Each structure stands twice: as C-alpha cells, then as structure tokens.
Amino acid sequence: MEQKINFAWPVTSSSKEEYVAFCEWMTAHKTMLESNEIAIWGAGIRGTEFSLFFKRTNYTKIFFVDSNKEKWGGYINEFPIVSPDTMREKIQTGKVKILISAENSKEIEEFLEEDGYKKEEDFFTVRSNLYEKYVEEFIRPYTRDVLIMGDCEFSKISLEDTDMRNLAEMLKDELGERRAKVLAMHGMGLRSHYNLLHTQIAMGMIPKILVIMINLDTLTGKQHLLPRSQHEELLRMVYEKAHVDSKEYEEYLEIVHERKKNLQAEFFTTNKFGKRDVPSDAKSKVYFRVNYLYELDVETEGIQYLKKIIQLARENNIKVIPFVPPVNYELGERIFGADFNKRYAKNVNKIDSIVRENDLELLEMSYSLKQNEFAQPDTPDETANDAGRKKVAEILCRKIEEVM
C-alpha cells in the first residue's frame, strides 16, 4: 500500500502581522466559516501556517488544493491535498469556499475568475499589509544611528507567547524608534539586503551602524533561487517609493522576476518527509541537514553579497555588526550527537573567516538560547519565543551600544 506523504512545513511561529491579519479575517467571515468547508489553495509554508491558525480556533473543516501534481494525494498534517479538478467537484456541493494562501495571489485569483469564481464570494485572500509596512519603515526618517537588516527572526512571534512584541519591536523599544530602523523580511537573502542598503544610502539615509543578520539557511545553494524568497512585488514597491535611479537594482529586479517563475527549484526543495506519522525527530533531522549542516560554499551568491555589503559599508563609513542568530543546538545535539556541533561550527567558521578578513568581528549568537527559549523546543525552527527574543534583544543592544 502506498504511503501518504506529509508535505507540512515545521511551522511553530508566524509573523505578527500575518497572525493579526488572519484573526481579523476570521472574525469578519465568522458566518461564512460556520456553514462552509475551506479549501486552502497552496500546500506550502503559508498554507501550513493557515491550517495551524484554524486549528487554534478549533476550526477543522479544511482541505488543501495545489497545482503541483507531486502533492496530490498527500497531506498537510491531517488535512488532505487534492487537485484543482477535485476541488471543482467538491465546490459543486455549494458548501466549499477557497482561501488562497499564496502571498502573491494575483495569478491564482485570475485563474479562479476565469473559471467563473467570484472574489469575496467564492474565494478569499488574507492581506497582512506586510509589504506596505516594510515600505513605510524603509522610507521612515530616523536619526540614522542604527539600521538593522535580516529575515523573519525580527518579525515572528511564537504561537504560544504572552508578550506579543516581535524582536523588531523589542529592539526599537530599547534603542528608541527615532534612533533605529529595522528592515526584515522572511526568506530574504543578502543580495536583496545589499540592493536595499544601497538604496537607503542613495536616499541619504546613511546609518552610523549596520546590524546585518547572517542566517545559514539563506546561504544554501538553492535558497536564493526559490520563488518564495524573491519578494518581487516588495522590491518594486521600494524602488518606486525611493525615487532613485539604479541600473544595478533594475537588473536585479529582472533576475528576481525570472527566479520567481523557477518552479523547478521549488519542487526540488519541497518539504516532503515520508508517511503521515513520521516521527518529529526525523523531520527535524532533514531540516537541520538542509538548512544548517550542508557544506557551505563560500562562492555562493549569499557569501559574495555579504562581502559586497561590508565593502559598501566601508565606503560610506558605516560600522558593521554581522551576527549569526541562535540555533536550537540542544535539539541538534540530541538528534546528531557531537557531530551536530562539529558540522555546524565548520560553516560558522567559514563565515567568521570572511568577516575577520574584512577587519570585523562576528557576533556569534548560535549558542545563546536554551531549547525552551525557542518557539517550540522540539522543532528546529530558529524563531525564539518571547523570553528568547528578550535575551536576543539584550545581546544585540549591548553590542550596539559598545560599538556606538
């Protein structure tokens, strides 16, 4: 008998904006949800996230639909994944509505409308205005003391937190919002950060200190090619608002546009772990291997653009604090034994060597948090819970004041 594949991603946290937007959407559509089953279009990270949000409210009338044939017949945890044709058959009952999980939903909306479905009647989207908030932060005037750049560790919260401030909010509360700007987006690689930093400088917003996150999972050989890592719409929005001319930025937008269509890379790295009841340690093992224990190639795009960021900062007299965020090393040691630290350290040492070659010191925070200070102690998600975020904020603020 063929085993069912679980395509669920190990989601234990969410961006604060995403969670708030979803809760608001559920409240606004309470009556519709009571009388309908929901087909979540998109069996990926955000779709997994949506299913967890639903479960938190005890709503389980859910199934998934995806255009990727590899996923048909599989599951997102207990929820089945079907083809668009099967979804059409189920919709004929009149008791099914579609919720699009893809961030860039325009193409899916157009596809559904061509099939005769109506927006806000047959299908829905959840807009978190995450991009709009990023653009607001990008153009916001500040004293230019500290610019902080990185990915989702700054914007995420644990689904079990009591202090719902994300790390970006904690840092701005401690440093003062007038002094600090935080530009963070999930999955964003160092090439994007380089172009965004270059644009800030071109706008005359040259910070005294740049704090740049170096996250191992954004430095893999595939991460920078994945459609979900491109954020084409956001990068275009920033460029339009910045009112600067940059041939390099425009060329990068063209590259991002092509990468966004690179479904082959997405399929290659799809998150399938085997049968539905696969142990969580097995999932964690795959995640650690793919995102932390691979052999880091110093010629990859991420590393090359780390060097370019450092060079750009030097040219503009910007002090740089490069840092590696915490990893759930206790879980890694439990699964891999001493081999975890050995293989992980090998990659971090490569980053440290590059940083030192440029007369900088790497702020190595890998072992700063205990297992119970992560969003979920038994998953490899690098997102900290509220107690862990407070500790990370304290370490970063001490370093910033020291450099200042």
Image (cartoon, rainbow, N blue to C red):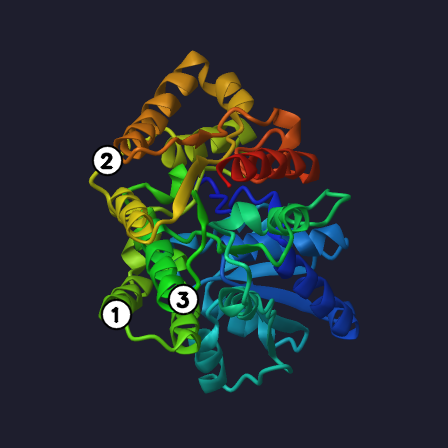
> Mark 1 to mark 2: distance in Å?
25 Å
Q: Looking at the rendering, in which quadrant would you find the N terminus?
A: top left
Mark 3 Cα shell of 10 Å, populated few (<14), some (14-19), many (≥20): few
Q: Earlier in the sequence, mark 1 or mark 2?
A: 1
Q: Earlier in the sequence, mark 2 or mark 3?
A: 3
- Residue that label 1 marks: 254
Answer with the quarter of the image where residue 321 lies: top left
Q: Earlier in the sequence, mark 1 or mark 3?
A: 3
For badge 3, the amino acid type reads Gly
- Residue that label 2 marks: 297
> Mark 1 to mark 3: distance in Å?
25 Å
Q: Nearer the viewer, residue 378 or 206?
A: 206
Q: Residue at x 43, y 53 (%)?
A: 71
Q: Position of residue 383 (x, y in %)?
A: 57, 40
Determine whether label 1 and label 3 are within 8 Å by CB: no
Label placed on residue 204: 3
Placement of 363 over or under 98, stated as above or below? above
For badge 1, the amino acid type reads Glu
Q: Position of residue 162 (x, y in %)?
A: 77, 43
Q: Nearer the viewer, residue 263 or 382?
A: 382
Q: Nearer the viewer, residue 381 or 327?
A: 327
For badge 2, the amino acid type reads Asp
Placement of 377 over or under 74, stated as above or below? above
> Mark 2 to mark 3: distance in Å?
34 Å
Q: Looking at the image, is mark 2 or mark 3 nearer the viewer? A: 3
Q: Residue at x 45, y 82 (%)?
A: 110
Tell me if 208 is positioned left or right of 31 in this view: left
Q: Position of residue 174 (x, y in %)?
A: 66, 45
Q: Looking at the image, is mark 1 or mark 3 nearer the viewer? A: 3
